[in-house]
Amino acid sequence: MSQRRSLLPGFGLSLGVTVFTVSLLVLIPLVALVTKSAELSLGELWHTLADRRVLAAFRVSFSTAFAAAFFNLFLGLIVAWVLVRYPLPLKRAWDSLIDLPFALPTAVAGIVLTTLYSPNGWLGQFFAELGIRVAFTPLGITIALIFIGLPFVVRTVEPVLQDLDRQQEEASTSLGASRWQTFRRVLLPPLVPALLTGFSLAFARGLGEYGSVIFIAGNMPMKSEIVPLLIVTKLEQYNYPGATVIALASLVVAFVMLLIINGLQQWTRQRTGRD
Amino acid sequence: MSTTQNILRPAPRTGTAPTESIPWVRYALSALALLIIALFLILPLVAVLFEAFREGVGAYVDAITDPYTGHAILLTLITALTCVPLNTLFGIAAAWCIARFQFPGRSLLTTLIDLPFSVSPVIAGLVFILIFGSQGWFGGWFAAHGFPIIFALPGIVLATMFVTLPFVARELIPLMQEQGSEQEEASIMLGASAWRMFWTITLPRIKWGLLYGVILCNARAMGEFGAVSVVSGHIRGATNTLPLHVEILYNEYQFSAAFAVATLLAGLAIVTLIIKSIVEWRQQRQWENASS
């Protein structure tokens, strides 16, 4: 690829097909979302978004998506570390299984997690003995989002772990650093950008996730109702402007969050001096 | 950590550095990782099978052979057979113009292709209601001409195409950028037609990446729930795909039947994962052969 005129054929055709499809499926729909929202006056906009039920749904969605992505940082790092560094029987099989949450339809994940974590389910009964309700609470939503988000962290951390130069670890240990110091000073810095990427991918997915959550959430307004469900509820009441405004607001907020995380990532990259 | 270095030297996958082999740490971490995999990934799969057969093989067979289930399977297959080929062609076209040419707006186009990944499936369904719904921009016109889009098959196909749009393109763009265009340029200079160049040079080199994108696209197309749920209207025997059928059965407290139908989708997921690891393995081999 260079600045000179390309010899290769098919530019017009491929660009035409691409632009046409992207316009039809992505661009026009997004414009529709914005213009439909713009039909509302500022007062109506405020009235829709400042509603207590809407604010509560945003709170539930953000806190559960954040908690799940945060928890996945640890689970994902442990799984990626073991899969890359340690000899394990059937390693290929375990490694392929990591992608299950990508491949399993979300409705199936939703009903099976609800069954497992309901008070008399295989896992829920242990929580019930401790007096903890998982299904039909925000804790249940968090568990579903941990399931959905796990591969994002594992898959972004794995390649970085594979590329790490082990001589640095050996040098650090032979110079007398403890294992913890080696982990903190040598291993962790290059992993931080990848961990942040995994976190933001899992977080973004968690904010929008619908199928795997609605079964386990219980969907009680003010308590365990997520933003995507609220959009569906408004649609079912034929409140299209309401649904549109909430959808646009959640898109905007999600993009702002991702911008902040991307900025943070740039900053850590510059600080650790890696690409 | 430059890309060229990665190409020349595939990262070693096994073996341990002498410094990290304190046995108890290794065993504890391995056990913890396997526990995470068992609790979060294997147990749900086992539970799907267990619940599906809870009321016996007869009930399972009844649920699978129910006419409504049959119709849902048919609709899911039609949707996937429409969306996957179209998105495959789109992915090849998008990767060709983005990876092989420089033009203004290239990175904007790439961002727009990636966008469906970061949009909630519910919003993906909502936007098509805004355009084609009864109160939407074009909805009235299409409905008046006997071709309703929302609460009908075209809406399901549109919503599915939106959520699966990035899969093939995202797989091919980095692959083709890394491969470079020298061989294709050589074939054109030697007088090959565009068609011949594509079939003899481009396609053989991207086939594994393409297959990878296609199976992921297919899995998502068959399993999509949120976007399809919003546009389908849940009309049983008419606009009910397999994942929606699972939801309806579950909400009617027909748990065994819901899980029986869910085994079909879980089976799809397992087959997808198996094909995916075979493709990954072939891709790696093709890559090693090329670099040695």
Image: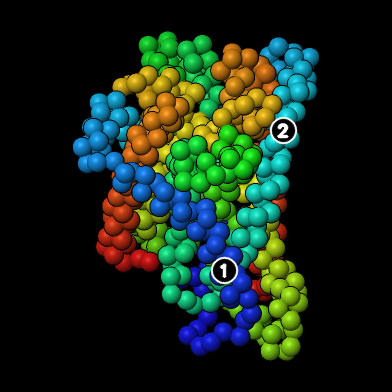
- In the depicted structure, whether residue B164 falls above or below residue B246: below
Q: Quadrant of the C terminus of chain B?
A: bottom right
Name the kind of residue labelled 1 in the image. Gly
At numbered mark 1, what does the secondary structure look like: helix, strand or loop? Answer: helix
Name the residue: 38% across, 30% down: A239
- In the depicted structure, whether residue B283 falls above or below residue A64: below
Q: Would residue A264 appear left or right of B21 to someone viewing this image? A: left
Q: Is residue B123 visible to the viewer in this orientation of the structure?
A: yes
Name the residue: 71% across, 68% down: B203
The label on residue B73 is 2
Name the kind of residue labelled 2 in the image. Ile
Residue A55 percent location from the top left of the image: 27, 30
- Select label 1 or label 2 by which is in front: 1
Q: Quadrant of the N terminus of chain B?
A: bottom left
Residue A104 percent location from the top left of the image: 60, 36
Chain of the residue under the numbered disc 2 shown in the image: B
Which residue carries the number 1 mark?
A16
Q: Nearer the viewer, residue A87 or A22?
A: A22
